Structures are given as structure tokens and as C-alpha cells.
Amino acid sequence: MVLYPKLYFKKVTDITLDILRDHNIKGLILDVDNTLIDFDRNMDSKIKLWVDKLKSEDIKFCIVSNTNKVDKVKKVAEELDIPYFYFAKKPCKKGFLQAKQLMNLDNKNIAAVGDQIMTDVIGANRCKMFPILVEPLGKKDIFITKIKRPIEKLIINRYLSKIKKEKV
Ligand SMILES: [Mg+2]
């Protein structure tokens, strides 16, 4: 199902090395807005520690963001010391494929992490990558995202009830 993630977590730092190894993931594509930073551009210091730890275990990283605000993406990328692509127009494949090329990994070994189904999850599924959905960091969204949230909520609820059924 193109709308469903493979895994769903509260926040990016819940994604552990063990989880990545279990699914043979060697690289992570990260979304920025409401995944790494909130609406006011604050980033939790734990995220830097999380990235550094996974890097030390040879996990590769690349940022793929839809925002056209290069200064915002660049600041996050520099702080985490990872490459970036911005104005990516996810769910278009282009940004994901640019990141894949840079990381030099197979699609199946790449997880794309983000807070939106319509952009992050659908884009990753279209590229046959491993989509990981996280809860948005804040309640504040840009206008276009705000419109999509109720639909996303419906899809997430269906996804969660499907998982629950599978576990029974
Ligand atoms: Mg986002």
C-alpha cells in the first residue's frame, strides 16, 4: 500500500541501530520540517547525538526537504554535518534518487524518514525505499500541510488498526 509506512515512531531518535539492522537499512533520508525541526526552527540536541551515533556505525545520511528556504535546510544540514537537497517536490522521485546516488546504496537499503504521508511516505514507496513515518514535532504547520493533516490522520488510524489486527 503506497499510503502506508513500514514503521511508525513518535520521533526520529526512536529509530535505533537494531531496528535499522533488522530491516537491512544502511542509509537514511531525512525530512526537515516537523521531523528534525519545529515550526520555529528549533532542533532537539538529542538529534545530533543520534545522527553521530548511527554515523559511527556506518549508517549514511542525506536530507531531502520540500522547503524552498535554503538557509533553513542548510543550517540543519551543517549542524548535523550531512548533505542536503531542498525544494525536492516530494512525492516526486527526484530528490530521493539524488540522495540515493549520493549515498551510493540500493533503494531497498534506504529508509526515508518524515512526518507526512502525502510527501515522505508516498515518495519513498514510489522509489521502493523503506518509509518510516514519525509524528510531527509540533502542532504548527504551513498552510498547505495543515489542509492535509486530517486526511493523514485517517490513513494513520487505518494503518494502526491494520497492524493491530496483524499482531492478533
Ligand atoms: Mg515534514
Image (cartoon, rainbow, N blue to C red):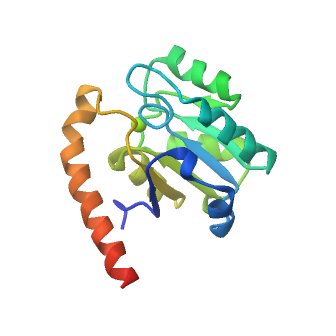
Compared across the picture, whether 31 is left or right of 26 comes to left
Percent of width and height locating residue 168: 36, 85
Any part of residue 55 in sight: yes
Q: Quadrant of ligand 1?
A: top left
From this view, report whether residue 128 is shown above or below residue 27: below
Out of 60 and 45, give the one closest to the viewer: 45
Out of 84 and 114, give the one closest to the viewer: 114
Out of 1 and 31, give the one closest to the viewer: 31
* Quadrant position of residue 101: top right
Compared across the picture, whether 102 is left or right of 134 comes to right
From this view, report whether residue 154 is shown above or below residue 29: below
Out of 167 and 95, give the one closest to the viewer: 167
Q: What residue occupies the far top of the structure in this picture? A: 71
Any part of residue 91 in sight: no
Check the picture and name the quadrant holding the N terminus: bottom left
From this view, report whether residue 84 is shown above or below residue 92: above
The residue sitting at 67% across, 29% down in the picture is 80
Compared across the picture, whether 44 is left or right of 33 comes to right
The residue sitting at 31% across, 74% down in the picture is 162
Q: What residue occupies the far bottom of the structure in this picture? A: 168
Percent of width and height locating residue 113: 51, 48
Percent of width and height locating residue 69: 46, 17
Percent of width and height locating residue 52: 73, 38
How many marks on residues?
Answer: 0
The residue sitting at 39% across, 53% down in the picture is 122
The residue sitting at 29% across, 26% down in the picture is 142
